[in-house]
Image (spheres, rainbow, N blue to C red):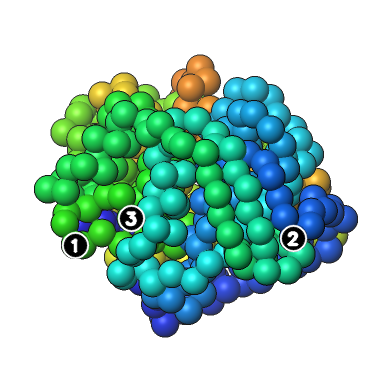
Amino acid sequence: MLHGPPLYPIRVTFPRVIAKASYLRQITSTLPFRSVQVGTSLEGSCPPSVFIGSHNYPKVQAGPMIAPAEGETGYMDTPETWLPARRTQEEILGFRLSLVRGKHPVHAVHPEGRFVESLQDIALSGASLKSRVEFGYTPQGFSFSQESTPHGPSAPLRTLDLSASTWDRDLEKVFYDTDLTASDAIMALHAKGVAFSRIQKALSVGTMGTGRRRRLVPTRWSITAADSTIGNRLLGEVRKYEVIDEVRIHEFSSLNNHYAVILIPTPWQYEWAEAFVHVKGNEELVFADHEGMKGKKGYSTVGGCFYSCRMAVLEALAREQAQAGAIVLREATSGYIPMGVFNVRENVRNAMLSDPLSQDSLKSALKQAAGGMTLPLDRFLGACNLTRDILAERQSTLSGFLS
């Protein structure tokens, strides 16, 4: 069973999620970018990339995303490579908005037929696929989301022709193992070093799970489901390790964001706080959420980024075979554009790969973190309930670390 947000529509609403989502939509609604212009026929290359919509679930719109280019286009849909390659925000948006989304109605709970098989061929392919599509009308618009990466124009599909594919061997093995649960499949692939983006796409097109329990999972749900599943499993490992004996801080900046990850000598507890400073104008907004030592109930009030960050920190702790509490501060400044939670996951992963600075206390670590931010520390602390509680309690496994 997958952990985290349910893989079906929910009617429960969270005011802070709505406020944040509304704010991010305001940012993207005024963007000066234009997506690629194509006609009703398109010959190109599928990265490989698929997108499963969530509107009207379980009757959703699904289809491939195709670039009007020839050859290997995998870099367009592999976020894990963008930061190491020093891709700029403009470069990423450039090739993302050149991906054209085809749409076709499918039933997510009963994923059958040749079209679904084509989507699975795409998601499991080890390389880009030569593609030819015809649309019902000229593809239009573009899409930005706080969970998934942007893409260019979209239109209903009339025809879809793909070159023969050779499946990735690890993904293929999972596909044919119908006794393997979805969560076990996700963890088996993660343990083998398969890119998160490949795992998420394979989950979304219904290639994981036991027997007839396989379903199509809308893209934005599959991202958080994979982050949550990996994070929960890693937390089970991390809780078995010794708690670190010092306060550490990891910092990293890219794509108009600065991240500070503070590790403290306590059993696992976690707080995420993100500030948006002068992105639209003069606004200074902070959103935060946390889980204590006993875990968290319900879906995060700040959305999928909470789980992406959590997974990235736990991944690093499991690699080190250490346990710690984590306080993560993120600041987005002028020029920032919402491009999905990959931005959080990959930035925090890179932060955790950087050399940490040892600190005398949590207070000194927070001051160090504030030095890389434009927003005053007290503005972050005003939203950070867990961090304020830790500072107030002045308790720790390491004597005096909060002094």
Kind of residue sitting beneath label 1: Arg
Q: Position of residue 24 (x, y in %)?
A: 68, 62
Residue on which the image places disc 3: 206
Kind of residue sitting beneath label 2: Thr
Q: Secondary structure at mark 2?
A: loop
Mark earlier in primary sequence (1, 2):
2
Kind of residue sitting beneath label 3: Gly
Q: Nearer the viewer, residue 304 or 170?
A: 170
Mark earlier in primary sequence (3, 2):
2
Marks 1 and 2 close (CB-CB < 8 Å): no
- Relative to residue 339, is residue 247 drawn left or right? left
**Quadrant of the drawing holding the C terminus:** top left
Residue on which the image places disc 1: 212
Q: Position of residue 274 (x, y in %)?
A: 59, 52
Q: Secondary structure at mark 1?
A: helix
Q: Residue furthest top?
A: 355
- Relative to residue 25, is residue 131 drawn left or right? left
Mark earlier in primary sequence (3, 1):
3
Above or below 310: residue 171: above
Residue on which the image places disc 2: 40
Q: Nearer the viewer, residue 97 or 301?
A: 97
Crowd rating for badge 1 (residues with CA inside 10 Å; few <14, some 14–19, many 20+)? few
Marks 3 and 1 close (CB-CB < 8 Å): no
Q: Position of residue 118 (x, y in %)?
A: 44, 51
- Relative to residue 394, is residue 25 drawn left or right? right
